[in-house]
Image: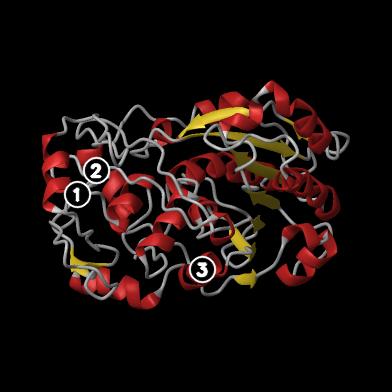
Amino acid sequence: MTQPTAATDNLVFQRGEVDRPCIIDLFAGVGGLSLGAARAGFNIALAVELDKHAIAAHKKNFPKVNHLAGNVNELTGETLLKHAKIEPGTLDGLIGGPPCQGFSVIGHRCVTDPRNNLFRKFFQLVSECKPTFFLAENVLGILDEQYANIREDALSLVRDSYVVLDPMRFKASDFGAPTSRERAFFIGYRRKGIKTLAQSDFEAAKTTNAITVKTALTGLPSIHSSWITNEQGMRKVGAMPTTPFFDHVRNGVPCEIGDPESLKLLHEEGIVSGCMGTMHSPEVKSRYQRLKPGQQDKISKSVRLISDGLCPTLRAGTAADKGSYQAVRPIHPTAPRVITPREAARLQGFPDWFQFAPTKWHSFRQIGNSVSPILAQRVLSVIYKAIAAESQK
């Protein structure tokens, strides 16, 4: 197993491996931000998540991390630090992706949606925990004028103590992920721990090496519709190129991160999970087969992926309290079927050893709700290096 190296380059953090800079991940989900942070060099001191399926998967992938299953609205900074086992005034970062449904362009976009209050709550907890930096991500819709008061009300809680950067729009593909998913990032820092940080620093972390759908799916097996259960979805992965992207897919396992059994299966037997099929009728298969790349099926609304293009934003569907509607899944670029959870994970930028819920519905929700860990790593690496540089002085 390889340890993360790209994140820190030649800059070594002075406090050492045991005392890496610590963060708390709110609204952690399955762990896209958590994985990016760990690969960037941070220690995940606490992950907070309300959904029982998401936190169960997070625990599997981050077995040594402290977990708190709870409603963020009911938490205080003191509570967070206590569960993270961190002394007041010593937290390095507070990160998270507050619920985005109230801001999403595919939702009802209601300014009074109660979930919007969690965006403000994030910054309230920043003001109480007093970390060196904060990072919040959300859908681009939050940048619309109708939400200006919500943004300003939230950021006003931290402006006196933090240098708050203007909101930044980051597209995952610009940072090496095979998806065009774009998100808004809110980042701020205290000068006592970071001398300076600017948008140009994050722009410099971008890459020109685009990863296409065809490349991202390399090595994954052909799928049979009869592979329905989690056990049937455990399949061998084929050969993969020796490139930075596939090193990310197969390796890049941070210290004390990853499910030991899943890591063993991948590295010793070449077996990955999540290769479950979907049983389509002959008529649906025929429709899907006739679709050209990029075309949408008029009935299912699924779009056929373009082999030499990027994966569009993967949707999460709705939770049980909103009807448990499954999100529309993309159609495989060459096969007449929708993609599998493992294919979705590859396209979102998750490594093959990363685990999701054992059912397709929950695994697709977890992947669709996640930040690409490739994007998260590159963005958080910029912050890590800024902290490390200041520490070395």
Q: Position of residue 388 (x, y in %)?
A: 63, 46
Image: 164 above or below 350:
above
Numbered circle sitting on residue 331 = 2
Q: Position of residue 106 (x, y in %)?
A: 52, 35
Q: Which residue is mark 1?
A: 337
Residue type at mark 1 is: Arg
Q: Secondary structure at mark 3?
A: helix
Nearer to us in this view, 374 or 117 = 117
Q: Position of residue 163 (x, y in %)?
A: 78, 32
**Which residue is drawn at the image coordinates 31% and 53% (left, top)?**
249
Task: Determine the CA span between mark 2 and mark 1.
Answer: 6 Å
**Which residue is drawn at the image coordinates 68% and 36% (left, top)?**
110
Residue type at mark 3 is: His
Q: Position of residue 358 (x, y in %)?
A: 37, 70
Q: Nearer the viewer, mark 1 or mark 3?
A: 1
Q: Which residue is mark 3?
A: 53
Image: 12 above or below 151:
below
Earlier along the polypeptide chain: callout 2 or callout 1?
Answer: 2
Q: Can residue 5 be seen in this snapshot? A: yes
